[in-house]
Image (spheres, grey):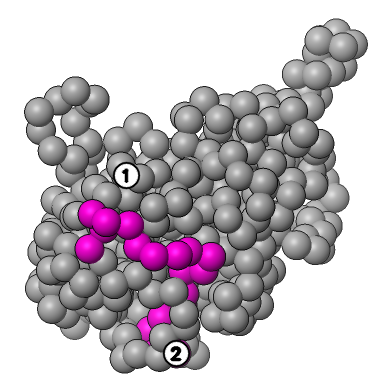
C-alpha cells in the first residue's frame, strides 16, 4: 500500500543570523540577531535604516558564472538554500526521474535590485544599454525556473506570490502535488531580497516598517513598544518527498510531516466582518485532524504593528486559550523576510521538533495589554512533537500550517 504522506527530508537556510541550517539554528538558540544597519546602499535618506542581512554570502560558491549574470541576489539566495536542502537530504536529482520532480517557490518582490540597475541604465544611457536578462531576472518565477533548469526537475513547477503567507502556501501546494501519482519529490520554500533603494521605497509604502535606528529596539512585536517591523533578506528551502519514496531510497532523516494547512483572506478595510486569521488556524487544525491541545508551540507571524499584533494574539488565545500555548517569533533576530519569512519559521519549527526546544523572541519587553499569549523570550527546553506556523501577507493573505514529528 502506498504512503503518500508529505514529509520533509532536507532543509537549507540562508538567514541573516546564520548562513546554513545549523549555523542559523545555533545563532537562533543563542539569541544572536542578524539585524544591523543596511550595508548594501546608503540608507541615510530612507525612513528605515536597519535590516536583516545574510552574512558572508558569496553567491559564486553556489551559482555558476553564466547564471550569475542572468539573475538577482534573490535568486542567488534561493539557489544556495536549495543546494543546501538537497545536500541535507542526501538527494542527487541526476539519479531520479526528471518528470516526477517538481519545484514550487514563493516570492513577493522578484528581482528588485537587478531591475533597478537596468532601469538606471535605461534612463542614464538609453535602451541599448539594458541587458537582455532584465526580461527574466525581475520576474517572480525566476527562481523556480532556474532551480528547475539547474537540477533537471521537469515536473509540475510554479510560484506563489502571497507575500509572507507564500512561504506556507508553497508547502501546501507541494503536499498536493505529492498526492498525485506523477510526483515523488518537490523542491520548495521561499527567499526574498529587496534591500535596494527601489525595494525600500516599495516596502515603505505600506507604512508598516520600523523607523527605529537601534537594531535591538527596532522590532518588538506584541509589546507596548511595537512600532513596525524590520525588513530582511534570505529564507529557507526544503526537500519534500512522499513517505514511501523517501523510505525506498533510504532517506537518512525525516524532519517531520506536513499534517495540516488552511488559508483565508481578510475582508476589505471598513468591512463589518472580522479578520480571518482565526479561521485559518482552526482550518489547519481541522485538516490535520488535531485539537488545540495537541499543539506544543506556535510560531507567530509577529507583524510588529500594535493592531495587527492584537489581532494575532487574540486569534491564538481564542483557539488555544489565553496563555495556554507557548508562542515564539524568532524572526525578531532576522526581520520579516517576506516570502522567505514563513519558510524560515517552518525550518525553525522542524528543528524545534528535532531538538525538543523552543527558540526565543529576543529584544522584547513586557507583552502588551490585549495580547494574552505566553511569549517565549528565552530558549525553552520542551517536548515538541507538533508545531503550528502562522503567516500573514500584506493585502489580506493568511496561512497556517501544522507539522508533526514522524
- Left or right of 281 on screen, residue 344: right
Which quarter of the figure is the C terminus placed in?
bottom left
Which quarter of the figure is the N terminus placed in?
bottom left
Q: Secondary structure at mark 1?
A: helix
Can residue 314 be seen in the rendering of this structure?
A: yes
Of the two numbered discs 1 and 2 in the rendering, the one whose residue sits closer to the viewer: 1
- Left or right of 42 on screen, residue 80: left
Q: Which mark is residue 308?
A: 1
Q: Label 1 crowding class (10 Å Cα cut-off): few <14, some 14-19, many 20+?
A: some
At 69% from the left and 68% from the top, the residue drawn is: 19
Residue 126 location (% of width, % of height) = 85, 8
Q: What is the magenta segment's predominant secondary structure? A: loop
Residue 399 location (% of width, % of height) = 29, 51
Against 406, is 11 above or below?
Answer: above
At 27% from the left and 50% from the top, the residue drawn is: 310
At 23% from the left and 38% from the top, the residue drawn is: 265
Against 232, is 294 above or below?
Answer: below
Depth check, front residue: 303 or 107: 303
Question: Magenta stretch?
Answer: 351-372
- Choose top left, top right, bottom left or bottom right for residue 316: bottom left
Q: Label 2 crowding class (10 Å Cα cut-off): few <14, some 14-19, many 20+?
A: few
Residue ID for mark 2:
355
Amino acid at each position: 500500500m502506498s504512503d503518500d504522506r508529505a514529509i520533509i527530508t532536507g532543509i537549507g537556510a540562508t538567514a541573516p543570523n546564520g548562513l546554513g541550517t545549523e549555523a542559523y539554528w545555533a545563532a537562533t538558540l543563542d539569541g544572536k540577531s542578524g539585524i544591523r544597519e543596511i550595508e548594501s546602499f546608503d540608507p541615510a535618506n530612507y525612513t528605515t535604516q536597519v535590516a536583516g542581512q545574510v552574512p558572508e554570502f558569496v553567491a559564486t560558491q553556489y551559482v555558476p558564472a553564466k547564471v550569475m549574470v542572468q539573475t538577482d541576489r534573490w535568486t542567488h539566495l534561493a539557489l544556495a538554500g536549495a543546494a543546501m536542502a538537497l545536500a541535507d537530504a542526501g538527494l542527487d536529482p541526476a539519479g531520479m526521474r526528471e518528470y516526477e520532480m517538481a519545484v514550487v517557490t514563493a516570492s513577493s518582490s522578484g528581482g528588485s535590485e537587478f531591475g533597478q540597475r537596468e532601469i538606471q541604465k535605461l534612463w542614464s544611457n538609453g535602451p541599448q544599454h539594458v541587458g537582455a536578462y532584465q526580461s527574466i531576472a525581475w520576474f517572480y518565477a525566476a527562481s523556480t525556473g532556474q532551480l528547475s533548469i539547474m537540477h533537471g526537475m521537469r515536473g509540475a513547477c510554479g510560484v506563489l506570490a502571497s507575500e509572507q503567507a507564500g512561504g506556507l502556501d508553497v508547502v501546501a501546494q507541494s503536499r498536493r502535488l505529492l498526492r498525485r501519482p506523477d510526483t515523488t519529490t518537490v523542491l520548495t520554500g521561499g527567499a526574498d531580497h529587496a534591500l535596494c533603494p527601489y525595494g525600500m521605497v516599495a516596502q515603505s509604502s505600506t507604512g508598516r516598517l520600523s523607523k527605529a535606528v537601534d537594531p535591538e529596539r527596532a522590532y518588538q512585536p506584541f509589546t507596548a513598544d511595537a512600532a513596525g517591523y524590520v525588513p530582511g533578506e534570505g529564507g529557507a528551502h526544503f526537500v519534500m518527498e512522499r513517505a514511501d519514496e523517501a523510505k525506498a531510497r533510504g532517506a537518512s532523516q525525516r524532519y517531520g510531516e506536513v499534517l495540516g494547512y488552511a488559508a483565508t483572506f481578510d475582508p476589505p478595510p471598513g468591512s463589518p466582518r472580522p479578520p480571518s486569521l482565526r479561521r485559518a488556524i482552526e482550518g489547519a487544525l481541522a485538516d490535520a485532524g488535531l485539537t488545540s491541545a495537541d499543539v506544543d508551540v506556535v510560531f507567530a507571524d509577529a507583524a510588529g504593528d500594535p493592531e495587527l499584533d492584537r489581532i494575532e494574539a487574540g486569534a491564538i488565545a481564542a483557539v488555544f486559550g489565553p496563555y495556554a500555548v507557548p508562542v515564539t517569533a524568532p524572526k525578531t533576530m532576522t526581520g520579516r523576510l517576506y516570502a522567505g519569512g514563513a519558510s524560515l519559521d517552518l525550518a525553525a519549527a522542524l528543528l524545534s521538533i528535532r531538538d525538543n526546544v523552543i527558540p526565543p523572541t529576543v529584544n522584547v519587553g513586557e507583552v502588551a495589554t490585549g495580547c494574552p499569549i505566553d511569549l517565549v523570550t528565552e530558549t525553552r527546553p520542551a517536548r515538541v512533537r507538533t508545531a503550528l506556523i502562522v503567516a500573514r501577507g500584506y493585502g489580506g493573505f493568511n496561512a497556517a500550517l501544522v507539522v508533526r514529528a514522524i
